[in-house]
Image: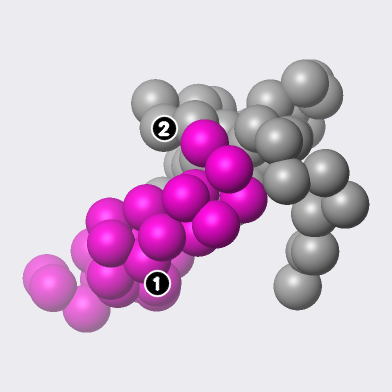
Amino acid sequence: MYEPQDPTRRFDVVVNDEGQHSLWPADRTRPAGWRPLGFSGSHQECLDHVAAVWTDIRPLTTRRETSA
């Protein structure tokens, strides 16, 4: 787990095409395939947000296959 050295560092919650969520430092360029989800905050605030909104951690393709 990432332990932030600077508690004032800001992060963005990002998501990929499979619906997987991650945190990314707000001051760094996001890797290809990841887009902002629209939530930024401290490391812990972002972790809390991801826990609240990403309740089914299966990839999107797997969720679609099992619901068909």
Q: Disc 2 to disc 1, how far (Cα)? A: 18 Å
Exactly how many numbered labels are in the figure?
Answer: 2
Q: Which residue is located at x 52 percent, y 36 percent?
A: 41
Q: Which residue is mark 2?
A: 39
> How are the colours assigned in the image?
one colour
Name the image quarter holding residue 55: bottom left
Look at the image and give the residue range highlighted in magenta: 41-68
Q: Which residue is located at x 37 percent, y 53 percent?
A: 49
* Residue type indicated by callout 2: Phe
* Residue type indicated by callout 1: Ile
Q: Which residue is located at x 77 percent, y 21 percent?
A: 27
Give the main secondary structure of the magenta stretch.
helix
Q: Is residue 60 visible?
A: no
How crowded is the residue under tag 1: few (<14 C-alpha within 10 Å), some, or many (20+)?
A: few
Query: In the figure, 68 relative to 42: above or below?
Result: below
Q: Which residue is located at x 13 percent, y 73 percent?
A: 67
Q: Quadrant of the N terminus?
A: bottom right
Return the mark for residue 57: 1
In-front residue for pair 64/33: 33
How crowded is the residue under tag 2: few (<14 C-alpha within 10 Å), some, or many (20+)?
A: some
Which comes sooner in the sequence, label 2 or label 1? 2
Q: Is residue 63 left or right of residue 2?
A: left
Q: Is residue 65 visible?
A: yes
SS of the residue under disc 2: strand
Farthest residue, direction bottom: 66
Q: Position of residue 54 (x, y in %)?
A: 33, 61
Q: Position of residue 56 (x, y in %)?
A: 30, 72
Query: In the figure, 63 relative to 30: above or below?
Result: below
In-front residue for pair 67/1: 1
Farthest residue, direction front: 7
* 2 or 1: mark nearer the eye: 2
Q: Position of residue 44 (x, y in %)?
A: 55, 57
